[in-house]
Amino acid sequence: MKTIKIISLFALSFSLLTCKADTKPTKNNIVELNKATKPINKSTIKVALLLDTSNSMDGLIDQARAQLWEIVNELSYARYNHKSPDLKIALYEYGNDLLSNDNGYIRQVSAFTSDLDYISEKLFSLTTNGGNEYCGQVIQTAVNELTWGSNESDLKLIFIAGNEPFTQGPVNYMNASTKAKEKQININTIYCGDYNDGITSMWQHSAKLTNGDYMSINQNQNTVHIPSPYDDYILELNIKLNKTYIPYGKQGRIKVASQALQDSNASKYGKANEVSRTVSKSSSFYKNSSWDLVDAETEGKNFSYSKIDKQLLPEELQGKSDKELQTYVIKKKTERNLIKQQIQEENSKRKKYIATEKKKNNTNNNLESAMLKAIKKQGKQKNYHWIK
């Protein structure tokens, strides 16, 4: 009996040693472990907008201003691996005689940014004047200057709009398109004029070279914003939403003023456009952690209440302790989340109403419809999908 016990204990010890040997990390196991624990980069929709600002393009600029927020709203419904991507927009103008000839009459108005108020501000700063439109050169400039990155899940898009032959200028558009394709950038061309004229002036060919889309629009068509029974309440919620922002730092007060100005700019194109901006402000794309304490606290990266210069806070908050300030911020965060939820709920009803009204009016020959059609088509090719 004793012998059997000894044998059993030996067998158990051998079994334990074998298990340990089997579970000892190997080089292959470590590689697999690293793959499993390696953080996945969040996907980003990167849109570079290249606008012709020569004399004939006043209507195009107006459309970009009037339709920015509806484009942002539609992009906010995009998902990649069931998660909302980030959005970054860059802006160039070209073909304006007020710009330097040394740079091909091209100017980077904004590099890639997620600051939507800044993009709105820059769109409203654009003016038109004369010009030579060098499409190949502005594409090459955007491809070379902007930080496109190497994340395979990013959706990288250039939209170039204008009405002169694509062959103008010192840079061959085919070479510029080839460089874009190497970086997995799709070039989408929007000809402002007759569809067939755009084909003969090579706007379609550039898009084909990069698996992009060619479209034509009437740049002088007025943007039609459809009013809804939900607009007034959404604008009331916008007033409440603005009161949840807590400016901090050197840029805080300036950015609060800019936020109010972009609200005002949106209203210049009617109540419905102002509503579209409010909906954008309730989306995940509208982030202001560089100047707003609620977004900064939410983001949490390198954020500390002890590092805040309280002299730059609103006067009523300057005497608060770090703990008191945190309590106040969390209260405003709760308020904001509730308001955003209310805006989204009202907008869901608004979208259904507008969809019904749109069936009665054919208003699709504009910048917004052209861009969204291309974005959704190319997004689906990279496994993006759109929630309703």
Image (cartoon, helix red, strand yellow):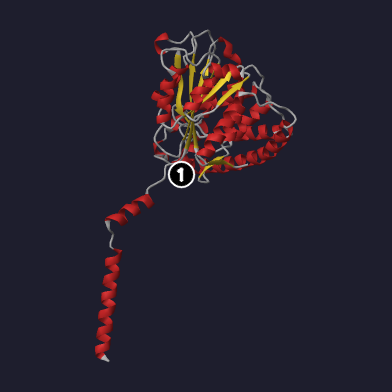
Q: Quadrant of residue 374?
A: top right
Q: Amino acid at mark 1?
A: Lys
Q: Nearer the viewer, residue 277 or 259?
A: 277
The x and y percentages for residue 283 are 57, 37
The x and y percentages for residue 64 are 58, 22
The x and y percentages for residue 306 are 40, 39
The secondary element bearing badge 1 is classed as: helix
**Quadrant (top left, top right, bottom left, bottom right) of the N terminus:** bottom left
Dot 1 alpha-carbon crowd within 10 angstroms: few under 14, some 14 to 19, many 20 or more: few
Q: Nearer the viewer, residue 320 or 155?
A: 155
Q: Is residue 357 above or below residue 269?
A: below
- Residue drawn 56% across the image and 15% down it: 163
Residue under circle 1?
323
**In the rendered picture of this protein, how many numbered marks are placed on residues?**
1
| Residue 174 shows in the view | yes
| Residue 285 shows in the view | no
Q: Is residue 269 above or below residue 305?
A: above
Q: Is residue 349 left or right of residue 39?
A: right
Q: Nearer the viewer, residue 319 or 123?
A: 123
- Residue drawn 31% across the image and 57% down it: 29
**Quadrant (top left, top right, bottom left, bottom right) of the C terminus:** top right
The x and y percentages for residue 365 are 65, 24
Instruction: Name the residue furthest bottom.
Output: 1
